[in-house]
Amino acid sequence: MWDSERLTEIAALAIYLSVLLGIGLRSARQIKTSVDYTLAGRNVPWIVVLATTAATMVGGGASVGSVANVYHIGLAAAFITCAWHLQLIFTGLWLAPRLRGMQLVTVADYFEAKFGELARRLAVVSCLLFVVGALVAQFAAMGTITESVLSLDYRIAVLVGGAIVVFYSTVGGIGAVVKTDVLQFVILVTGIAVAAGYLVQHQGGLGNMAAVAARVDSNAFFTDMLDLFGPESRMRILTLFCAFFLGELLVPPYAVRCFIARDARSAQWGVAGAGIFLLLFMPMATYVMGVAARCDPAVKAKVTQQFHEQSATTNPSDPQDPPDDRQPVARQQAASAAAQTAFPTLVRSAFHPLFSGIMIAAVIAAVMSSADSCLSCLGTIVMEDIYRPHIQPQATDRQLLRVAQWTTLVAGVLTAICACVYRDIVAILEFVYDFWAPTMVIPFLYGLFFYRRQQIPAVVASMLTGLVATIVWKWGCGSPGGFSPALFGFLVALGTLLLLLPAAGLIPTHRLLEPGGQHGTRNLADGDGHA
Amino acid sequence: MLELLTILHYVSQAAAVAALSLLAWHYLKPCLRPSQPEQPSFERQDHE
């Protein structure tokens, strides 16, 4: 039986999920064309772009995961997440206006327009890999968080949460995604800001909190909550910072935020504004919550219990056995996994059940807003990059709309089932990030800032070598020295580009390397899509 | 470091208030002008 506190939390969550369903149904009535479905009519103002971009950025990792990491390694965890937000500022200020001006529908359209058909096909594969992997990871995060917070069965949580996301994304398209993102943004920001403000006030200021946290020494690998680098080496922190910056640069969910904006200026200030806001807000808010969690005896007890359970699972040997070389790593992993319970336990321990219900809804909202964006992108990619160019070039707008809707539905159901079977979120996200930066980031930046048509072969060659180098480094060599496959692939791609640039003009041209492509980007601003 | 973090905490709170206020203003603006049609401004108005 559930107690009254648990019922209050579940009631708050049920109300929130009902509102999401209502928004989906309301948005469905406004869908007339594939443009409405995939691009919200390209008429989203900057403040709404800001809210939807920020809501998409903050998923389970940036909320529950960041608080857990601050609990585990301190200020360094908050510092590393700044890379995500700086990446958004960079994208907004310098890339978003150019992308919006090109009237694109998908990321692959950009590669076709700049580098030709071969680059487009590589981009389609990379985008599919990214959105499918990210979607499975977000569904898995939804199940994991609901399981740990509300003690519901993981599979039931994935299927119920997934069904709601799939429903409103399928019937309402990106319009429903944007509207639910705005609601999720309001709940998330209000919940986290009120919680952080209350915790600092209640515990007598940040200085007092840091002092109390330093005295609490549960399974801590450090005690100074004010040390910027904590227990990690500076090289590791800086490497992670670079990986976070490059890993999500121009991924489809953010690129679409540039495409749906009302104009170039709305895209610029919407995306950059989201980055500026998150940079000012999230690292500090998650830091405060992580420090508050370290001060809370209830959190300490729960994390310690989890730590012992994790240790018993990962290292079943007798605790009295002499330590071997693997034990420090196993202890670190067990402590890191145990810290994931810090956020939900803090929320339950520090706040009234009604507010903890709102906070739990906020966390679920964070995960859902990231999942729905990936799902919406998946439908658009299949419709625009696969069905229209390769299966039915003469498709009417009604057919395209149906393809996008059916893809969203079927892909949503399949990925939710995948998340039920495979729930290692970190492994899925690592896999996804490893393949994005080496293939996609260099051509994106080169095409926007240094583009020369005669150098297309060098750019496409760098995409291919980056992809092959990542595969070889990851699976062939087993990532020696712990060096990230994404960073290795990125450096190989960059080296290939710099090496081939001077000779690119000598390579004979081929129709697969002709920019503009055979399919051509639909000029939706001229009303195509209303056929 | 503590002073810096304390200032950043207040900046973080101010950023949240500013973002929510801007968003509220965006949605309340049409309601404050009764002569304007009440439509969320990011929806297409010319479906025909």
Image (cartoon, rainbow, N blue to C red):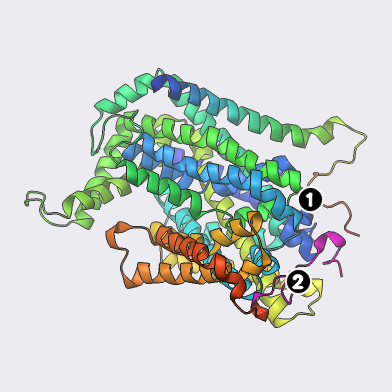
- Name which residue lies at 88% across and 31% down: B33
Instruction: Write down the residue under mark 1.
Output: A43
* Chain ID, mark 1: A
Taking the image as shown, residue A459 lies to the left or right of residue A525, namely left
Q: Residue at x 40, y 17 (%)?
A: A204
Per the rendered image, the range of residues in magenta is: A513-531
Give the CA distance from mark 2 to mark 1.
22 Å
Q: How many tags in the picture?
A: 2
Name the residue at 56% across, 65% down: A501
Q: Is residue A157 left or right of residue A305?
A: right
State which chain disc 2 sits on: A
**Which residue is labeled 2 in the image?**
A520
Whole-percent x, y for residue A164 in the image: 60, 57
Q: Looking at this view, is A280 or A17 the one in front?
A: A280
Task: Specify the principal SS of the magenta part.
Answer: loop
Mark 2 lies on a secondary structure that is loop
**Residue placed most toward the observer, A333 or A481:** A481
Is A192 part of what is drawn in magenta?
A: no
Residue A473 horizontal/vertical position (percent) = 36, 67
Q: Which is nearer the eye, A378 or A12?
A: A378
